[in-house]
Image (tube, rainbow, N blue to C red):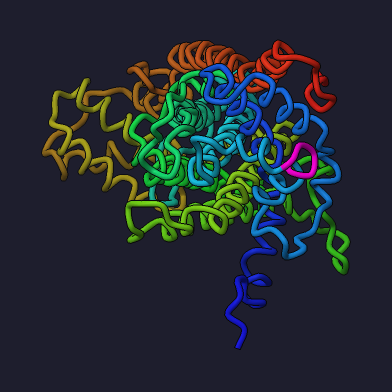
Amino acid sequence: MNDRFPAPIYDETVLAVNFEDAKHYFLDSLLEIHAAHTLMLCRQKIIGRRDAEVCLQALGRLDRATLAEATRDGCCEDLFFHIEQRLVEQCGAEIAGKMHTARSRNDIDITMYRMVVRREILELTEAAIGASGVLLDWANDHVNTIMPAYTHTQPAQPTTFAHYLMAACEFLERDIERLRELFARVNRSPLGACAITTTGFPIDRAYTARLLGFEGLQFNSYGAIAAVDYLTEAAGVVAVLMISLGKLVQDMLLWCSEEFGFLRLSDAYVQVSSIMPQKRNPVALEHTRILASKALGQAQAVLTCAHNTPFGDIVDSEDDLQPLVLSMFADGLRALRLFAGLLGAAGIDKQSLSRRVSDRPLTVTELADTLVRKEGMSFRQAHELVSRAVQEVGGAYTHRNMVSALKRLAPSTIQRRLRITDQECMKALDPVHFVNLRTVDGGPAPGQVRAAIARSGAVTASNRGWLKRKQQLLQNYPKRIRRAVAALGELPASFSSET
């Protein structure tokens, strides 16, 4: 029996897979961490300037393309040790080994994970802002487009398409707010926590945090290693966003059906059947739905993987979990980008929307309200009278038939005739009048919706400004590392690019 590490099956099922994942997701972050930590060690006089220069020059000579193509040969356990071996080849074991003073793979790994996740957060935020912008543009064009609002999947009352769209804009704004708050908590540096209790060397954690583009420290060293709420919060935020997006997509798939006929996707986003020439299959919406569902499922899986694990350094939240987190972000990003693209090229059938309002008793709530105002009766009395009239009219509903039934049923229902005129009743049943009356904050009246559009436009501008600042932060920190390296001596080749 061979007891030598690693066992072949362990190598095949764990180490080889994790090695490939690390190259794909974390190579650049790992090299940046090496450089930042070495600069800090020199700055704190923990290692000598000349040794730091040699280490950084060796690091700069590493060819990233070659590292990315490397395969696990069994000599090194993981990508960290593979790179360490390449550095040993460059500058010798004694000097290369000094780079690992006052750190551990534990804090290196968590730092890498946070560096990658923060980029994913910004990409998802950008896509959410883009989707919100498309909805906002549509809302601006449809302030007066009457449509039915649905409750319990049944047509309920008139509203406007803009009012519906602004509800979606608002939930996306809340999602973006959650993403912004998530970024603030993820973008904290755990580097310097070492294995879990820091180090006896006089390191400067704040300096490495600044070099790596972090905006603060994950302060407690135990929590920096052991806590996984930066991942579980990310999963929660993505899950909420995908659930809300899925509700919109479900509506729009129904609207694309001939039975509804409200929404028409551009030909660029539909597919014809291989056998039925007449078909216009809204497959782009279906792809959006499954991508959102996949992202939601992956978010749930992240939470499941983190559940009931010890509060300490464990592999459950490391190599095998991280690709799942990043796949969650990737599918969420695909869903949002596809949704924004297809919606930006879609069209709405205003006449079909209007017919669904005018040929059904969707305005009778306002008729009951008008009876309360004009007749002085209680709402319960008005509700009963209007309800009986709706039942009597049945499938022969028109505004005129509704008014006739109302007048005819009043004596037996409220024991007197109505004083309200037919013209007042007909006005109460007009969908446009119904909408225009609802001037309460958040209602569908055009003035309220235009005010909401203006507010959302300001929020969107603020979100775009925030996003630009954070993108610049992540674009600029490598330059900070390169400047610090250059200040020590000759600039290594791989640190010379401004891209």
In the rendered image of this protein, does residue 109 appear above or below residue 162?
Answer: below
Q: Quadrant of residue 379?
A: top left
**Who is closer to the viewer here, 163 or 460?**
460
Relative to the observer, which residue lies in front, 164 or 61? 61
Residue 391 position within the rendered picture, expressed as x and y whole percent measured from the top left: 33, 52
Residue at (46, 20) in percent of width and height: 206
Q: Residue furthest bottom?
A: 1
Q: Tell me which corner region of the image, top left, top right, bottom left or bottom right, holds residue 477.
A: top right
Residue 106 visible: yes
* Residue 151 percent across, percent down from the top left: 39, 46
Magenta-colored stretch includes residue 89: yes
Query: Residue 117 colored magenta?
Result: no
Extreme residue in the front direction:
94
From the top left corner, tell me how far across and down residue 284 is, in percent. 73, 49
Give residue 333's quadrant in the image.
Answer: top right
| 471 shown above or below 296 | above
Which residue is painted at 13% across and 38% down in the image?
414
Q: Is residue 431 visible?
A: no
Residue at 37% over, 44% down: 227
Which residues fall within the magenta stretch?
88-92
Compared with 125, 468 (above or below) is: above
Of 167 and 323, the residue lying toward us: 323
Of residues 456 and 409, the one nearer the viewer is: 456
Please state, as top left, top right, bottom left or bottom right, where the N terminus lies in the image.
bottom right
Image check: 330 left or right of 268? left
Quarter of the picture holding the C terminus: top right
Side of 453 relative to 373 (left or right): right
Where is residue 451 shown, x and y percent of the image? 46, 11
Q: Residue at x 36, y 52 (%)?
A: 312
Q: Main secondary structure of the magenta part?
A: helix
